């Protein structure tokens, strides 16, 4: 009887501790975009890709993601770009990450060395991060990438 009581106490404790776990935070694509827009100074200098551009450039049609916000420089003097794409589930997020990797590789492979050579490091050092069903990529200066990643991390930690 004493062993049964101890086992019941252990199972109850495990159940209580499991219930204390923190649920995954989903800040939403709008808050994530706002955070990156702020650090990337995107408000007046970047434009959003529409669904056709996502389909043409990344081979992601609307059924390939739940939500997306991809922005690029509106003027051709820099190549600043970032994207936040949310999959419906982990499998779709993995497919999105693969598509983003292929897109960045295509951009790197087709780069013309004469075209804005000072901008190539942004593309060469492009960063992809994932969190839950979100895939985010940054073709930005190192300073902006770090600030964007910090802002995003803080939103997922709330």
Image (cartoon, grey):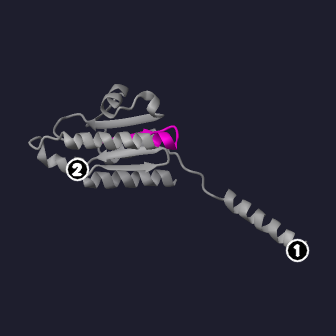
Residue closest to the far left: 114
- Disc 1 is placed on an element classified as helix
Instruction: Identify the residue at image location x=31%, y=52%.
Output: 145
Q: Which mark is residue 136?
A: none
Q: Using the rendered view, name the quadrant where residue 101 is placed.
A: top left
Q: Please tell me whether residue 12 is drawn above or below residue 62 in the rendered image.
A: below
* Residue identified by numbered label 2: 124
Residue 50, given in percent of the width and then of the height, sits at 35, 28
* Residue identified by numbered label 1: 2
Region rendered in magenta: 81-93
Residue 152, given in percent of the width and then of the height, sits at 42, 50
Classify residue 91 as left or right of residue 69: right
Residue 111, given in percent of the width and then of the height, sits at 17, 41
Q: Using the rendered view, name the quadrant where residue 16 is placed.
A: bottom right
Q: Is residue 31 visible?
A: no
Q: Please tell me whether residue 6 is drawn above or below residue 48 in the rendered image.
A: below
First in sequence, mark 2 or 1: give its number.
Answer: 1
Label 1: how many residues lie within 10 Å, few (<14), some (14-19) or many (20+)?
A: few
């Amino acid at each position: 009887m004493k062993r049964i009581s101890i086992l019941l106490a252990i199972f109850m404790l495990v159940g209580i501790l499991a219930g204390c776990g923190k649920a995954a935070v989903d800040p939403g694509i709008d808050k994530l975009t706002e955070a990156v827009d702020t650090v990337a100074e995107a408000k007046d200098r970047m434009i959003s890709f529409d669904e056709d551009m996502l389909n043409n450039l990344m081979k992601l049609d609307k059924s390939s993601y739940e939500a997306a916000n991809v922005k690029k420089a509106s003027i051709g003097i820099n190549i600043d770009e970032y994207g936040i794409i949310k999959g419906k589930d982990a499998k779709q997020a993995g497919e999105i990450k693969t598509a983003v990797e292929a897109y960045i590789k295509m951009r790197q492979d087709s780069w013309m060395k004469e075209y804005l050579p000072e901008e190539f490091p942004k593309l060469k050092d492009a960063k992809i991060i994932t969190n839950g069903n979100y895939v985010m990529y940054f073709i930005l200066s190192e300073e902006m990438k770090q600030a964007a990643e910090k802002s995003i991390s803080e939103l997922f930690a709330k």
